[in-house]
Image (cartoon, grey):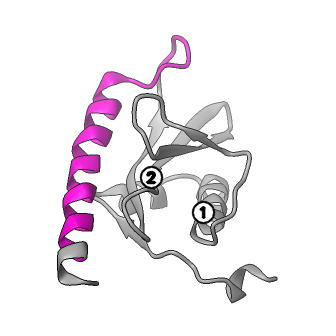
């Protein structure tokens, strides 16, 4: 079955996540966009991994020109995909995601939870 024939899950961009994604190199935008499309179609790709410490939150990792880019989304808040944050990982030491990025993801996850609850109340 073609991806377009499946029921695609809607995407909700939280904060400036879409704006940030559109600032990435075209190659990175394509890779993250393709991975999000797969998630919308309830499929998977090896570019996606769980974000440690955040149940139901995943990150799409794209390496390009010796840089690492991330797209973080929540997939367990109903039928929608909530893109919480897109950022270039600039940490020079280890693989740990910087605290300021984790804090922002946490804040936006709370916003996404509120949006999902509101939609559930409204029956949307």
Which residues are drawn in magenta? 91-119
Q: Position of residue 85 (x, y in %)?
A: 38, 49
Q: Is residue 93 magenta?
A: yes
Residue shown at 67% from the left, 83% from the top: 6
Task: Check the image and name the residue furthest to the top.
Answer: 93
Image quarter for residue 5?
Answer: bottom right
Residue shown at 19% from the left, 60% from the top: 114
Label 1: which residue?
Answer: 39
Q: Position of residue 34 (x, y in %)?
A: 66, 64
Label 2: which residue?
Answer: 73
Q: Secondary structure at mark 2?
A: strand
Quick one: label 1 or label 2, which is nearer the N terminus? Answer: 1
Residue shown at 58% from the left, 53% from the top: 25
Horizontal placement of 40 versus 103: left or right? right
Horizontal placement of 9 versus 82: left or right? right
Q: Position of residue 108 (x, y in %)?
A: 26, 49
In depth, the one of 10 and 88 nearer the eye is 10
Image quarter for residue 2?
Answer: bottom right
Vertical comparison of 121 with 62: above or below: below
């Amino acid at each position: 079955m073609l991806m377009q024939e499946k029921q695609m899950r809607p995407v909700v961009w939280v904060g400036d996540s879409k704006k940030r994604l559109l600032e990435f190199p075209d190659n990175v935008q394509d890779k993250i966009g393709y991975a999000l499309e797969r998630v919308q179609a309830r499929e998977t790709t090896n570019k996606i991994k769980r974000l440690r410490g955040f149940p139901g939150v995943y990150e799409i990792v794209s390496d390009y020109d010796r840089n690492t880019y991330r797209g973080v989304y929540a997939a367990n808040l109903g039928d929608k995909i909530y893109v919480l944050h897109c950022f270039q990982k600039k940490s020079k030491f280890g693989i740990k995601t910087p605290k300021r990025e984790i804090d922002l993801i946490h804040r936006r996850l709370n916003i996404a939870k509120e949006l999902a609850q509101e939609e559930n109340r409204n029956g949307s």
